Amino acid sequence: MKQQITNEDTLISLASPANRQGRQVADVLGGLTRKNKGSVGTAIVRVFDLAAASTGVSERSAKLTGLNPQVVHLSGKDHAGYYPDATDIYLKLIFDADTGKIYGAQGIGAKGVDKRIDILATAIKGGLTIFDLPELEFTYAPPFGSAKDPVNMIGYAAINLAEGISANIQWHELTDALENGKQLLDVRSEMELTNNGRFQEALHIPLDELRDRLSELDPSVSYVVTCHSGLRSYIAERILKQAGINCQNLDGAFSLYNTIKPEMIIHD
């Protein structure tokens, strides 16, 4: 089968595209003109209490096929956070920063992952780009979603990268970045550092104090800004850039980094 995004032959052992192909074969045998457009490989699996889903090509596959993907991570809730039993959803979007074409997406969480990946799979099939994601409209009430769904939000984040409003660095690039002279700046609160752990050798200035403490930063140094989920570090990034300080946002922030490399986090 053809991978629709790369147009390369690939193995997609899934029941849904197989059944569609069967229907197309039957139509052709019946004298109807049908053409298979390929598959984007949308799949999901449950592992204990979590569901993990993906669609399109992964970051690694995109790079191996000669694409130049940009990546953004986002954490959100499956429904409004103030409504009971909201759970975390983590999304990763792979896209072309020049054209906005969506290459793929991955998600994990206890609830609502299937809905978000299905939406993004439909967007890929329909030729939508990252610039369309914030405009997508979904049914909304607090038990079912958020006024700005995680799909809308990851669209906003991707557009910020594509338009140069924000710049990010991936978790696996952080070590090299720090070894090459960049400084990690953590804008979480002191209580968060105490309760959740802290980065090694990170400068700590809470976001609420950042404007008043800009004099403590070295304008000749490039900073990598982080918080818990990425929202406050984006705000910090805007503050720093307005002050003429070069910086990038740690994509996925502390939440993602701590999940992948907990051995690098210090607990007092």
Image: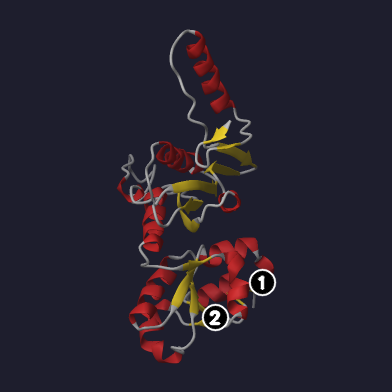
Name the element at disc 1: helix
The extreme top residue here reads: 30
Q: For the C terminus, give its image quadrant.
A: bottom right
Residue type, mark 1 in image: Met
In the depicted structure, whether residue 56 falls above or below residue 27: below
Closer to the chain start, of discs 2 and 1, is 2
The extreme right residue here reads: 263
In the picture, the disc for residue 264 is 1
- Front residue of this view, candidates 169 and 236: 169
**Residue 68, position as x, y percentages in the image:** 51, 56
Q: Nearer the viewer, mark 2 or mark 1?
A: 2
**Residue 30, position as x, y percentages in the image:** 48, 7
Q: Is residue 202 left or right of residue 99?
A: right
Q: Residues within 10 Å of mark 1 (few under 14, many from 20)?
A: few
Residue plotted at (57% across, 54% down): 63
Residue type, mark 2 in image: Lys
In the picture, the disc for residue 182 is 2
Q: Is residue 81 visible?
A: no
**Residue 222, position as x, y percentages in the image:** 49, 81
